[in-house]
Amino acid sequence: MKIDKETVEKVAHLARLEVNEEEKDTFAHQLSDILDHAEKLNELDTDDVEPTAHVLPIKNVFREDKVEDSLDRELALSNAPDKDKGMFKVPKIVE
Amino acid sequence: MLDGYEMTVGLEIHAQLDTNTKIFCSCKNEFGGEPNTHTCPICLGLPGTLPVLNEKAVDYIIKAGLALNCEIATFSKFDRKNYFYADLPKAYQISQFDLPFCEDGEVKINPEGEEEMIVGITRIHLEEDAGKLNHDGDISNANSSLVDYNRVGTPLIEIVSEPDIHSPAQAIAYLKKIRSILEYIGVSDCDMSQGSMRADVNISIAPVGSDKLGTRTELKNMNSFKAIEKALYYEPKRQKKVLESGGEIVQGTMTWDDEAGKTRAMRSKEEAHDYRYFPEPDLVPVVVDDQWVAKIKEEIPELPDTRQKRYVEELGIPEYDAGVITADRQMADFFEGVVSDYDNAKAVSNWMMGDFLRLLNEEDITISEVKFEPKDLAQMLKLMDDGIISSKIAKTVFEEMFATGKTPDTIVEEKGLKQISDSSELENIVSKVLEENQSAVDDYNSGNKNVIGFLVGQTMKATRGKANPGMVNKILREKLEG
């Protein structure tokens, strides 16, 4: 499967990554190769195989609905690049 | 209003679940609280943390699914919905994509002024809520936002309707029914003012008889029935105007400006969201067996429709009254409390539908904030039946009960409201009234028998409403004829 430069640009934008022109070409090739490799799996007959969302044979892992201590606010905010009034301060978001 | 066109509405209702803790961590699930005091490494999305599912949240979504007549999935899983926004610290929301817990439900509604109908429910899935952005002053002038992550990880169910709704009345009836049922089963308090219930509203129009739906616009996070209703009158008309002037509807998110009474396109970039859903690798699938479903089924109380039917059939109250009373579980519980102490259910429903609802609306309070007990209303009705207070005085007593929470006996005692049924006392009062109204007596004697109504009124006035009206009538007649 061929990944073109536009697709690389779109994926990069969705992941908020900056890539230069040279990288776009490199990634287009590399992503195409990866998909080609994965494409090989389609040669297998999987008609009788249940679709798998998870590879571990585990199900129903739960937590009891019991309150435990939360972080102190100062600790919760300690990695924040900027804060104000006990809240995380972020640049203005225009929707 | 839309001649030639029909509107179709899709509703996605979000309801916060009333669990003690968040969906994937043990932080307290609570509205409000000082900003960022209910967070931990998991809900803050710090690297290296793993979510663990709250079993109660699964119990609750199964309960909601059963109450809304859904099929409960035996195998369910979570998925990542990817997007960058500051309200979401992980940059993805854990939600469900192709294998939700509940599918194919339905609910019966009675839209005002329309026939009873069924609205299909496509699916109900479980997900986590996002944080809250705060702005100093006007958002358009702000150059930064402040983020409070207390709400991150609050368990949410999203209930998606089939495109069965075609009028504002149907949409409102549907929303109210869903709210009522969720309150009955106790999974959400559905308080719209606190955002624990909110809805995304999809609106499209198409020529009548067309089997295709038109292009839709979406109003997100609507949290008032009034605003939804107004938007549902406005938006289809706007769409019709666009179509009739040769334009096209642009699919996208709009915002409802309640002050202007208009929808407005948001400054959204043209590109469609690309959420790139994929199975959540940090959570294992959930398998729900028959035993689990059976256990939850047992916990479901009598729901509003069944309760309404029982009130009509067994207690003999009108269907409409029964509908109003059962729509709110607290109201219905209160009603049953009164009826358990007092036989005449019709009288109870009359009081609840009348003065009770009026005062609740005027004071803008809910049943749980009412100061008196169901047994007090029963006692008041008994006082009326026993002739101790008149129906007119009962109104005064009721208002006093509502205002102070005092028992009817105390109120009657303190305010001296006991009906005067003592015949000698009443005779004296009547005699005095007759003396003071000689011209009315003359009228009566000259054949105008209707004037007796005026004299009854004068006697009631003289006793400040406390005279037994039946006795006043009798004594007056005796004296006038005698």
Image (cartoon, coloured by chain):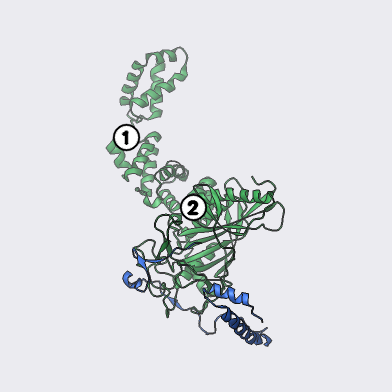
Chain colours: A blue, B green
The residue closer to the viewer here, B53 or B79, is: B79
Q: Position of residue B177 (x, y in %)?
A: 53, 55
The amino acid sitting under disc 1 is Leu
Q: CA distance from mark 1 to mark 2?
A: 43 Å
Above/below status of B445 relative to B471: above
Name of the residue lying farthest toward the left = B414
Q: Position of residue B9 (x, y in %)?
A: 60, 55
Kindly identify which chain the residue marked by label 2 belongs to.
B
Kindly identify which chain the residue marked by label 1 belongs to.
B
**In the rendered image, residues at marks 1 and 2 fall on the same chain:** yes
Q: Nearer the viewer, mark 1 or mark 2?
A: 2
Q: Is residue B446 left or right of residue B427?
A: right
Please report the residue visible at 54 percent of the width from the left and 57 percent of the height from the top: B266
What is the number of the mark on residue B350?
Answer: none
> Which one is earlier in the sequence, the residue at label 1 or at label 2?
2
Q: Work out whether residue B350 can be spotted.
A: yes
Please report the residue visible at 33 percent of the width from the left and 30 percent of the height from the top: B420
What is the number of the mark on residue B224?
Answer: 2
Q: Position of residue A77 (x, y in %)?
A: 35, 71
**Number of residue marks:** 2
Please report the residue visible at 43 percent of the width from the left and 67 percent of the height from the top: B152
Residue tagged by mark 1?
Answer: B417
Secondary structure of the residue carrying numbered label 1: loop
Secondary structure of the residue carrying numbered label 2: loop
Q: Is residue B234 left or right of residue B428?
A: right
Q: Check the picture and name the quadrant holding the N terminus of chain B.
A: top right
Above/below status of B66 relative to B258: below
Q: Work out whether residue A68 can be spotted.
A: no
